[in-house]
């Protein structure tokens, strides 16, 4: 997602403690669904729709579904270049494939780094999200603490958690494309939350905690009202996500006013 123009948006001026996310919406358990997809793949729009609708409806009882649409780049040579694709999403999918017998394909859904399946299987998606919510999880707290800055705190990791790292993803909803070539030529594709940027913040300490204040580095072309910061705590060996939280950046803006 490299772009030449990157700025820190001044509207994210929030006092410490405001717009804080330390519990999921309405007491729900947060579960992250990563969808590896491409606009060049004819079976991907159905998976995008399934995840988008699930995240919007939040219909899994007791669960907050957090969507991470990651557009891979290996379809780009087959007639249509996906404008949201990036090599780092292809590499993340390959990282997961090291532990999944099925390897990499599209559309591939990965739930909490533990379970994978074909992303357009709606019933499997809902059932797997519900199952993932039963696994013990860490506490992850997010807050917009200064202009364009995100404060992250992690603690209370499940007993026996091995080495883990903390990842930050920035997502944008409401994105779509009119596809001009390839398998989806002529179609208007509407996407689940698209990952705009992804980076590693650091590793969880030996005491099972992590704290950091990280710049958001928002691009001027992104719509603030549709942006969300998502932080994952992920075991480096098993790839299991043992903690996740998200913060709508529009909520942070509102809290500042």
Image (cartoon, grey):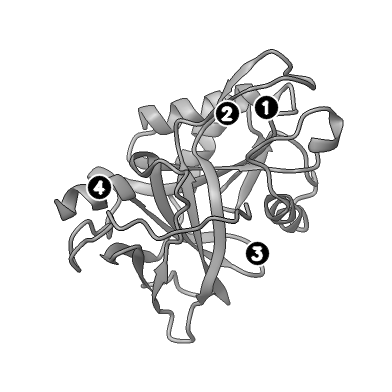
Say if 245 sits above or below 172 in the image.
Answer: below
Q: Nearer the viewer, mark 1 or mark 3?
A: 1
* In the image, farthest residue toward the bottom: 206
Tell me: 63 left or right of 239.
left
**What crowding class fits label 2: few (fewer than 14 Cα within 10 Å), some (14-19), or many (20 or more)?**
many
Quadrant of the rendered structure where residue 187 is?
top right
* Earlier residue among tags 2 and 4: 2
* Label placed on residue 44: 1
Position of 188 compared to 42: left or right? left
Q: Which residue is mark 4?
A: 251
- Please tell me how crowded label 3 is: few (under 14), some (14-19), or many (20+) other residues with Cα within 10 Å: some
The residue tagged 3 is 238
**Percent x, y for residue 215?**
42, 67
Evaluate if marks 1 and 3 touch, with contact meaning CB atoms under 8 Å apart: no
Quick one: which residue is furthest to the top in this view? 186
Residue that badge 2 annotates? 48
Report the Cα–Cα distance between label 2 and label 3.
26 Å
Of labels 1 and 3, earlier in sequence is 1
């Amino acid at each position: 997602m490299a772009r030449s123009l990157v700025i820190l948006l001044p509207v994210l001026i929030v006092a410490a403690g405001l717009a804080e996310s330390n519990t999921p919406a309405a007491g729900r358990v947060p579960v992250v669904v990563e969808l590896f997809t491409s606009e060049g793949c004819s079976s991907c729009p159905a998976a995008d729709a399934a995840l988008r609708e699930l995240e919007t409806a939040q219909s899994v009882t007791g669960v907050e579904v957090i969507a991470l649409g990651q557009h891979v780049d290996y379809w780009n040579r087959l007639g249509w270049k996906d404008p949201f694709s990036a090599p780092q999403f292809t590499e993340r999918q390959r990282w997961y494939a090291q532990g999944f017998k099925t390897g990499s394909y599209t559309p591939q859904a990965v739930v909490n780094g533990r379970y994978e399946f074909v992303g357009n299987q709606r019933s499997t998606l809902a059932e797997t999200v519900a199952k993932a919510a039963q696994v013990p999880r860490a506490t992850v707290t997010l807050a917009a603490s200064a202009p364009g800055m995100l404060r992250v705190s992690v603690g209370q990791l499940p007993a026996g958690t091995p080495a883990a790292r903390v990842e930050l993803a920035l997502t944008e909803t409401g994105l779509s494309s009119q596809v001009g070539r390839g398998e989806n030529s002529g179609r208007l594709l509407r996407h689940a939350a698209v990952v705009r940027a992804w980076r590693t913040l650091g590793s969880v300490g030996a005491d099972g905690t992590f704290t950091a204040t990280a710049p958001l580095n928002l691009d001027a072309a992104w719509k603030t009202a549709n942006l969300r910061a998502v932080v994952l705590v992920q075991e480096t060996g098993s790839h299991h996500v043992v903690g996740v939280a998200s913060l709508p950046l529009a909520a942070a803006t509102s809290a500042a006013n």
